[in-house]
Amino acid sequence: MSLALRIHVSRDATSLALGADATACAIATEAAARGIAVDIVRNGSRGMFWLEPLVEVTTPTGRIAYGPVKARDVAALFDAGFASGAAHALRQGRTDEIGYFKRQERLTFARVGLTDPLSVGDYVAHGGFRGLINALAMAPADIVAAVTDSGLRGRGGAAFPTGIKWKTVLGTESAQKYIVCNADEGDSGTYSDRMLMEGDPLCLVEGMTIAGIAVGATQGYIYLRSEYPHAHRALTAAIANAYAANWLGADVHGSGRHFDLEVRLGAGAYICGEETSLLDSLEGKRGQVRFKPPLPAIKGLFGQPTVINNVISLASVPTILDHGATFYRDYGVGRSRGTLPIQLAGNLKHPGLVEKAFGLTLRELLYDYGGGSYSGRPIRAVQVGGPLGAYMPESQFDTVLDYEAFAAIGAMVGHGGIVAFDDTVDLLEQARYAMEFCAVESCGKCTPCRIGSTRGVEVIDRIRAGIDRERNVALLQDLCNTMRFGSLCALGGLTPDPVRSAMEYFSEDFEVRV
């Protein structure tokens, strides 16, 4: 009896938006018509979005990639013999030999695109749960020490050392502790959390379980943004499968350790990406920023000690516990250790996810991976770190991807999202958008953010109209100072960064217009 032909088609939200479901259906229909038995696996995306829908055919020499494959292309692919990896205009060669993919260091995303995201057996066969098994044999303090020694810092934007958070929670006495995953990925140009949750949700399950074992927490929550329905379905199914296989529950892998996990949906508020607003929302309240202290690590969810980490931070932990702190720390530069899943977006030929060790330059990312602008025009500005990130001019493109290097020039790495703009962009309009975004998304608790952002829009409009330009430019600078130093959280405090950088490096866009 011959084995069925195994074909992989991504189930990632980006792939679906580009027609992956129709492509998978066409493959199944065409194969049936030709009497060819096929096993279609819906995997995560490899992160090469310009090739989606990407179809991979398993052959004796490896997985052969074809893309972008639309439903209308399928019959011609079968005619050409793509079932055996034959030549075709859409053939990209072996997936792991494609330059964009081959030059990456995939640690956190090692399984994304490779496995069936919901299969516990597939996960285990590709190294899954080895980190948790090691953690179950270690003392909690030793687990925390391994995470600390690895140099892992928060991948959500703040870059706070993960091990220090864990150590604080471990050392705080309480009958109940919590692990909370901040999956409220709301920054423009970011999607690594979504890709991980859709493409390898069990990695997040494992990372959160290790965190629970490390600090003595028995309950975990994934706070997921409501705009991620595919991730919600994937997480819900993966958690159910993990319970069925005894990787969650009252007796994790027969260890006698207890850890429960569930998903809670947000309601679309950007401010709930801030950890204390998230906690208020998770408790059923309106999401508003809390005063600190007390820190969430001491008094967090329901007043109990709580570890709050981003998706990628928690998903990096299994690699550390599997291969050791030194293995992870050997990637990166300076105080920026390990790898970062970088998300390329905006006006680029090759948008997608690139997981690389810290240390490469912004220019390498934009041109060696991103392929330059999609429009073919010069890249004029890049915003790194979401809507609160500074606009970086071409003169800063050789900056090394490193938390401290970016901070030294007034920029931030943030969550690793990079949005590119060609020379047609109007930076005054982008500065105005930053203020408008803040005005819309402010929780309203502090005056500098709530009122300052609204006044900021009005001042920029006056500059644009040529009304008393010099006075209003000075007023805008003063307003930025007030927001930076008077706001309660980073939303109001960082909104001045895109405004000030636009004024400093693209001052010609703020000149009087005719």
Image (tube, rainbow, N blue to C red):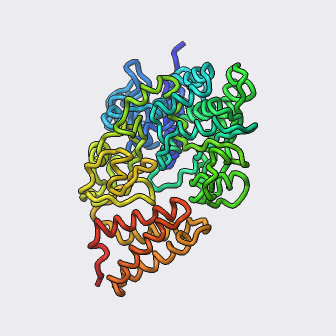
- Above-or-below relation of 51 to 62: below
User: At 44% across and 69% down in the image, what residue appears?
Assistant: 433
Q: Where does the image place residue 271, in percent across and percent down from the top left?
A: 58, 59
306 vs 238, nearest the viewer? 306
Q: Where does the image place residue 251, in percent across and percent down from the top left?
A: 73, 24
Instruction: Quadrant for the N terminus, please.
Output: top right
Q: Where does the image place residue 54, in percent across and percent down from the top left?
A: 43, 38
Q: Where does the image place residue 321, in percent across and percent down from the top left?
A: 52, 25
The answer to whether residue 434 shows anywhere in this view is yes
User: At 27% across and 54% down in the image, what residue appears?
Assistant: 396
- Above-or-below relation of 339 to 497: above
Instruction: Quadrant for the C terminus, please.
Output: bottom left
Would residue 390 be found to the left or right of residue 483 on screen?
Answer: left
User: At 64% across and 29% down in the image, what residue appears?
Assistant: 213
Residue 376 lies in what quarter of the image?
bottom left
Q: How many marks?
A: 0
Residue 198 lies in what quarter of the image?
top right
Would residue 469 be found to the left or right of residue 254 on screen?
Answer: left
- Above-or-below relation of 121 to 14: above
24 vs 491, nearest the viewer? 491
The answer to whether residue 26 shows anywhere in this view is no
298 vs 244, nearest the viewer? 298
Farthest residue, direction bottom: 467
Would residue 490 be found to the left or right of residue 254 on screen?
Answer: left
